[in-house]
Image (cartoon, helix red, strand yellow):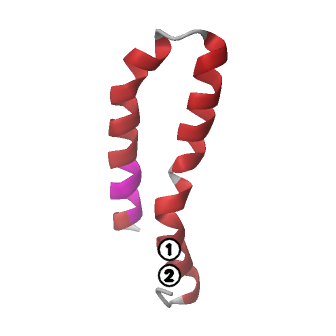
């Protein structure tokens, strides 16, 4: 769980760093960017969540 929290925290810091340049774009360009960034955190955590649920890494 601590690794999951650390990964999410690092991801939030990275995305927050992108916030200023992205907010300068038109709203129709921002929307897909925020959707992708909002879903992208799931993929690096998928193996970790699987390991937590079933106890095996692969």
Marks 1 and 2, Cα distance to the nearest angstrom?
A: 6 Å
Which mark is in front, 1 or 2? Answer: 1
* Residue found 55% across the figure and 56% down from its top: 42
Q: Mark 2 highlights which residue?
A: 51
Looking at the image, residue 28 lies above or below residue 40: above
* Residue found 54% across the figure and 48% down from its top: 40
Specify the principal SS of the magenta part.
helix
Q: Are marks 1 and 2 in contact (CB under 8 Å)?
A: yes
Q: Position of residue 33 (x, y in %)?
A: 57, 30
Q: Position of residue 3 (x, y in %)?
A: 35, 66
Q: Mark 1 highlights which residue?
A: 47
Q: Which residues are magenta?
A: 4-9
Looking at the image, residue 28 lies above or below residue 46: above
* Residue found 59% across the figure and 46% down from its top: 39
Q: Secondary structure at mark 1?
A: helix
Q: Estimate how packed mark 2 is, as few (under 14), some (14 to 19) or many (20 or more) residues with alpha carbons within 10 Å.
A: few
The answer to whether residue 34 is magenta is no
Q: Is residue 7 left or right of residue 41?
A: left
Q: Secondary structure at mark 2?
A: helix
The quarter of the displayed image where residue 30 is located: top right
Q: Is residue 41 left or right of residue 36?
A: left
14 and 33: which is toward the camera: 33
């Amino acid at each position: 769980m601590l690794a999951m929290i650390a990964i999410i925290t690092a991801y939030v810091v990275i995305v927050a760093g992108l916030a200023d340049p992205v907010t300068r774009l038109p709203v129709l360009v921002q929307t897909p960017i925020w959707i992708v960034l909002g879903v992208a955190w799931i993929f690096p955590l998928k193996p970790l969540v699987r390991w937590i649920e079933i106890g095996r890494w692969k």
